[in-house]
Image (cartoon, rainbow, N blue to C red):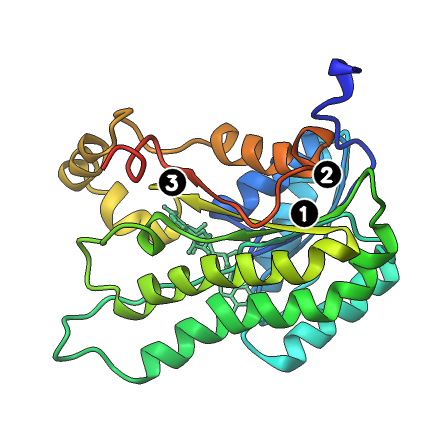
Amino acid sequence: MNTGALFDVTGKTVVVTGGSRGIGRMIAQGFVQAGATVLISSRKSDACADTAAELSAVGPGTCVAHPADLSTAEGIESLAAQVAEVAPQLNVLVNNAGATWGAPIDEFPDSAFDKIFDINVKGVFSLTQKLLPRLRAAATDGDPARVINIGSIDGIVLSITDNFSYSASKAAVHMLTRKMAATLAPQRITVNAIAPGPFPSKMMSYFLDNPERKEAVEGAVPLGRVGTPEDVAGTAIFLSSRAGAYLTGTIIPVDGGLSGTR
Ligand SMILES: NC(=O)c1ccc[n+]([C@@H]2O[C@H](COP(=O)([O-])OP(=O)(O)OC[C@H]3O[C@@H](n4cnc5c(N)ncnc54)[C@H](OP(=O)(O)O)[C@@H]3O)[C@@H](O)[C@H]2O)c1
């Protein structure tokens, strides 16, 4: 056994949606620092390009940007066409782009179901579907292509926030992960989900930018802290490396013990 190469992802081609900030950026940074060639995507083209430039400057891998609204069919087609050009053999797809919505039950709008499900669930399925030719081109028996969906602890345990469509969408991502894993295993494409607990990001800024709310969030985590870039990038790199080649259809909570100890 070559233990030195177990977690090696050097030279792999990786797409990270929502890679401009937050958890997507943490994952993209991990892959770039591990020597991979990464394409990130998000709606705001400036933010996306800035992040790609910053990550490429760190290296040793590279990062390029392609802006696209992945809640629309046009955005997905546009990203799929770009991937075909820059990474015809795609080793890893990280479906991370996502959004949330909070409102009390009596005020929760129907539109917040469409908006959240379009990006969090339909976008994950459609982009994976459109990139299957690229993933199949990279897949081998010994080194399957990998799809990593970013779910959430809110799809596993009850959330204390009024995020009705979000938590339902993340439970849907987890089941979609298992269904796609079963379908794609014979084609040597693995599909797993990471279910993060609290990580600092724009999505979590309401809680983590306020000292009292932050303390409450940290206090609820058995390991007593929020997640770091190493925590989530490490799991994504593990799933993409030789070490993670025999996992498919799993939902891995990266949550400081929040779900596993309840
Ligand atoms: N942070 C946490 O504690 C936490 C916990 C559990 C799960 N998660 C999940 O982790 C993922 C990342 O969340 P985050 O916390 O890092 O949130 P974030 O800081 O809000 O980042 C979301 C990313 O997705 C992009 N995005 C949003 N809507 C998009 C669309 N329609 N098309 C393309 N890109 C889009 C955003 O860029 P643009 O706005 O430029 O499009 C941004 O790059 C999400 O799936 C979220 O549900 C987060």
Q: CA distance from mark 3 to mark 2?
A: 23 Å
What residue lies at 15% left-to-right and 37% top-to-bottom? 216
- The residue singled out by tag 1 in the image is 52
Q: Which of the image's four quarters has the C terminus?
A: top left
N-term-proximal mark, 3 vs 2: 2
Vertical relation: 252 (above or below) 94:
above
Q: Is residue 148 visible?
A: yes
Outermost residue toward the bottom in this view = 110
- The residue singled out by tag 2 in the image is 56
Count the labels in the image: 3
Question: Is the CB atom of the residue marked by disc 3 within 8 angstroms of ligand 1's nearest atom?
Answer: yes
Mark 3 nearby-residue class (10 Å; few <14, some 14–19, many ≥20): many
Q: Is residue 65 visible?
A: no
Q: Amino acid at mark 3?
A: Phe
What residue lies at 15% left-to-right and 74% top-to-bottom? 105
Vertical relation: 175 (above or below) 234:
below
Q: Percent position (x, y) of residue 217?
A: 21, 38
Q: Amino acid at mark 2?
A: Ser
Judging from the image, what secondary structure is the residue with disc 3 in? loop
Q: CA distance from mark 1 to mark 3?
A: 21 Å
Judging from the image, what secondary structure is the residue with disc 1 in? helix
Q: Amino acid at mark 1?
A: Ala
Mark 1 nearby-residue class (10 Å; few <14, some 14–19, many ≥20): many
Q: Nearer the viewer, mark 3 or mark 2?
A: 3
Vertical relation: 72 (above or below) 217:
below
Residues marked 1 and 3 touching at CB (< 8 Å): no
Is 145 on the left-hand or right-hand side of 198?
right
Residues marked 1 and 2 touching at CB (< 8 Å): yes
What residue lies at 33% left-to-right and 33% top-to-bottom? 226
Q: Nearer the viewer, mark 1 or mark 3?
A: 3
Q: Percent position (x, y) of residue 66?
A: 70, 61
- The residue singled out by tag 3 in the image is 199
